[in-house]
Amino acid sequence: MGAAYTHRCDRCGYSFHTSGPWEFYRADDGSIRPYGHPAPLSAEAAERGVHGLLGKVYCPACDQVREVVLVEFTEPCRRPRSVWLDPPEPLAPYSSGELPACPGCGGTRLVLGDEGGEGLTCPRCGAGRLVATMDWIS
């Protein structure tokens, strides 16, 4: 059940967008492809199942929005709703429940929605605070 957020500085107006988590599957070459929500986008997606969830998250350490795998499962999930209702077992690196590190700088405080970004100092003006607003939810 993904959502999209706008994060805006209450002082200078600097803003950026984050979204997720979104279902994905892995292609034959190992690349990540969007699965679709609430239904598969393609026959290939339906055949492969959901391999995990990814999101577009903000890293305050490097001031970048990056696409990050939030969790990957030990086995593909063939029933997409169960990803949300009865999640499959995650691969070891994702079993702690913590967000992974930023793939760009290694920062460990990634922000998806309003669950951790409130009160962050604006990286642009240094005086305002970032405020998150949910734009939509699916």
Image (cartoon, rainbow, N blue to C red):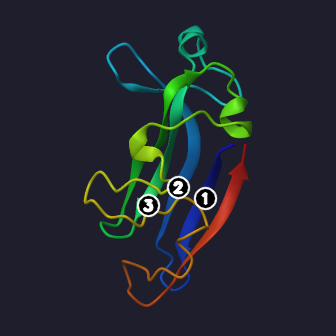
Q: Is residue 58 visible?
A: yes
Amino acid type for the residue under numbered disc 2:
Thr
Q: What kind of element bears circle 3?
A: strand
Taking the image as shown, residue 91 lies to the left or right of residue 113, namely: left
Q: In the image, residue 85 lies at what x, y percent?
A: 74, 38
Q: Nearer the viewer, residue 66 or 82?
A: 82
Q: Do residues under tags 3 and 1 come within 8 Å of each other at their CB atoms?
A: no
Q: What kind of element bears circle 2?
A: strand
Q: Nearer the viewer, residue 53 or 89?
A: 89
Question: Pointer 1: what residue?
Answer: 5
Counting residues from the N terminus, which is met first, the one under dot 3 or under dot 1? 1
Give the residue displayed 64% in from the left and 37% down from the top: 87
Question: Pointer 3: what residue?
Answer: 58
Q: Is residue 34 visible?
A: no
Disc 3 to disc 2, how far (Cα)? 7 Å
Give the residue displayed 38% in from the left and 84% down from the top: 125
Q: Quadrant of residue 113?
A: bottom right
Residue 78, relative to residue 32: is it above or below? above
Badge 3: few (under 14), some or many (20 or more) residues near its Cα, within 10 Å?
many
Question: Pointer 2: what residue?
Answer: 18
